[in-house]
Image: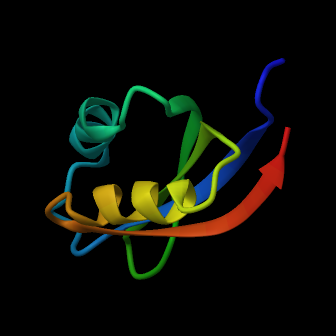
Amino acid sequence: MQLAENVLVIEIVPDSSEVNLEQVLEKIKDELPSYARLVSHKTEPYVYGLYKMEIRVVIPEREGLADEIESILNNIEGITAEVIRMGRL
């Protein structure tokens, strides 16, 4: 039996306009654990000339994994990451 999966929608906000979101995306791909899959991303205007990125990550449905992913991403320099939605696949 296959475990259920959740999709996380995570907002990535740079600390300044100097942060290169393409480089951040590559860092995210490197930092995600093997159980997590980055399935999509998009960049959109945020405030005062800043852009933010929204990513979707699929993880197994287990308690604590969403918090773990958020914590891993918040350790990336120059950004703040927040899970804004989570749903079951």
Residue 20 lies, in percent from the top left, at 22, 49
Report the residue that reaches farthest toward the top. Answer: 1
Q: Would you place residue 35 above or below residue 88 in this image?
A: above
In the depicted view, which residue is nearer to us: 83 or 2? 2
- Locate the C terminus and report the quarter of the image it occupies: top right
The residue at 35%/38% (across/down) is: 32
Q: Quadrant of residue 23?
A: top left
Q: Is residue 74 left or right of residue 37?
A: left
Report the residue that reaches farthest toward the bottom. Answer: 48
Q: Quadrant of residue 9?
A: bottom right
**Coloring applied to the structure:** rainbow
Q: Is residue 38 left or right of residue 59?
A: left
Residue 81 lies, in percent from the top left, at 41, 67
- Locate the N terminus and report the quarter of the image it occupies: top right
Residue 4 lies, in percent from the top left, at 80, 35
The residue at 30%/48% (across/down) is: 21
Q: Is residue 24 left or right of residue 56?
A: left
Residue 33 lies, in percent from the top left, at 36, 35
Q: Is residue 48 left or right of residue 53?
A: left
Q: Would you place residue 47 above or below residue 31 in this image?
A: below
The residue at 23%/39% (across/down) is: 27
Tell how many labels: 0
The residue at 21%/73% (across/down) is: 16
Q: Would you place residue 50 above or below residue 2 in this image?
A: below
